[in-house]
Image (tube, rainbow, N blue to C red):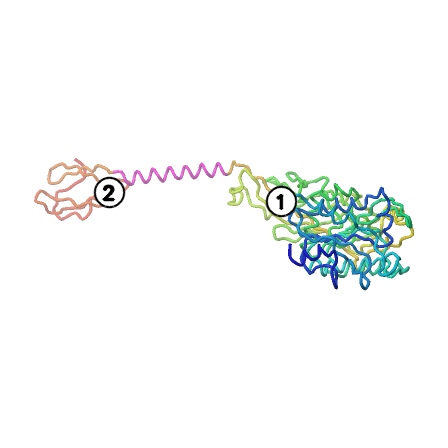
Amino acid sequence: MSRAFRHIAAAGALAGACLPAWAVSHVFLVQNSGWMEPFYADPASQFKPLVVELAAAATQPGDLMVLASFNQSRPGAPSPKALLSARVASGGAREQVRAAIDALGPARKPGSSALADTDLGEAVQAATGKALGGKPGLVWLVTNNRNSPNNDQATALRNREFYQLIHQGGGITKTLAWPLKMPVQGQQFRANGLMVYVFAVGAQGASELDALLASGRIAKVITEPPARLKPLDRATVRLVPRKVEDAPGVSFSMASNGMLRADVAPDAKTPAAKIGWRLENTMYPYTIASATLAARSVLGGEDRPIRLADARVDGLAPGKSVPLASVMQLPVAQLPGKWSLEALRSAGSAYVLPGRIELTLTGQRLELSRAFRERMAALFPGDPLPDIFIPPSSIDGSRAVLPIEVRVHYGVGPLLAVMAAALGALAAAAGAAYAFGRPRKAYLTVEGEQRTMMARAGTTQPIYDKAGAKVASLKTTLFGHQLTDLRDGAQVRLGR
């Protein structure tokens, strides 16, 4: 831990912008303005235990972490105010956060008995700009959802400013929110629930958040599904294959990692397949009131449109799905034949052709689901904050990408046949080499004298008479012997 961090931990406060200009993995902002009084005062409140368990679930040993309380900054009373800044201990963050938050209570305005006001935007901007130092990370905000700086009663306007910050400021790439039921009663106020936000900063922050959600650690603490605030133009729907028609030898399945697999038999020649899908709305808490659909596939270097039976979707509630029929071109021409080198290399396994299916929604109109509005009204009665979930007017479309693998399963028959042929050719070559290199007997008669010579194919040997003069040459091939360079009058012949 740096000297600056030791000072923060000891003093419990920061000058100027309040949070250290240090790149951390997580920043936890815990509201302690006046409106939060019942969460601190009620003996049965689960507010602090929630913060402890949330931090413990979100972090891993070795992560950098800042825990800070926030209300609204005043001269002499900076906000946010650091309670803890350290690396997460080897045993996890639970004890570190519990010790730091144990004595936290509602803050008051300097020199006054009045309880402090709230500025959500100020807290988030300080976390993204100062605590993260402009680097990727996750900012967690635990609040009662009342944004009222200077006790401003125009909460709808303040909420809209907060929402604009979420969509336009601070390099925020992804935002989720969990509305939680937590009825508490204090001496001055009562409340029914609170909200937990997480803001991913930068592309890496969004990836870290996706991985954290996929791990299931957050779901063990917060069992409610997260409401999406950003982005609203990507991964809004999901395609799940139901059945394939008129395509013998072709089947579809979903892998555990979300990859669509198309298994194709090596002799399948169908150029197109009728595929029935389930189109699911994954954009909780929004209902897709209406949108126009278009789809295409990118496979084997070819970009082809997918014909949809219905090009519109209406009234699709979050988590619900509707059937969608389509005709998709299959990359039969791009698949190697069973005697190709690619097929032989893939014998006994699968030849994989990667690609993707893209589904585009245009003229998209989103509406908050009725169930979500009712839940928010019950948790935060009289609070207009749910209005911040209204999608920005600039978002009128979205795109969903489904990665796909076309896999052709080649048997080992062609490979065995090629191997047998290769072995046969090798044996023939070995036999020829043996025959070529094996010495052969040649019988000659020279001046009436019988001779026997040993010769290898491809060689030529001189033949001498009894006086030692060269009279001919013996040329040997794979097919026998022959006399060459025969001298005039020489008495030489093959055979006995």
Q: Residue at x 39, y 39 (%)?
A: 426
Nearer to the camera, 143 or 447: 143
Secondary structure, mark 2, is strand
- Is 395 above or below relative to 212? below
Mark 2 or 1: the one toward you: 1
Distance, label 2 to label 1, CA atoms, is: 59 Å
On the rendered image, what quadrant is the C terminus found in?
Answer: top left
Residue sticking out furthest to the left: 467
Q: Residue at x 46, y 38 (%)?
A: 419
On the rendered image, what quadrant is the N terminus found in?
Answer: bottom right
Q: Which residue is mark 2?
A: 476
Task: Tell me the number on the disc at residue 406.
Answer: 1
Nearer to the camera, 59 or 447: 59
Q: Is residue 281 left or right of residue 430?
A: right
Query: Do the residues under discs 2 and 1 have CB atoms within 8 angstroms?
Result: no
At which x and y percent is residue 143?
82, 52
Residue 333 falls inside the magenta stretch: no
Residue 287 seen in this snapshot: no
Nearer to the camera, 137 or 174: 137
Q: Is residue 304 left or right of residue 119?
A: left
Secondary structure, mark 1, is strand
Of the residues shown, which amino acid type is indicated by label 2? Thr
At which x and y percent is residue 167?
77, 59
Residue 422 falls inside the magenta stretch: yes
At which x and y percent is residue 112?
88, 60
Of the residues shown, which amino acid type is indicated by label 1? Val
Q: Is residue 465 left or right of residue 44?
A: left
**Which comes sooner in the sequence, label 2 or label 1?**
1
- What stretch of residues is rendered in magenta? 415-438
At which x and y percent is residue 82?
74, 55
Residue 87 seen in this snapshot: yes
Within 10 Å of disc 2 (Cα), the crowding (few <14, some 14-19, many 20+) is many
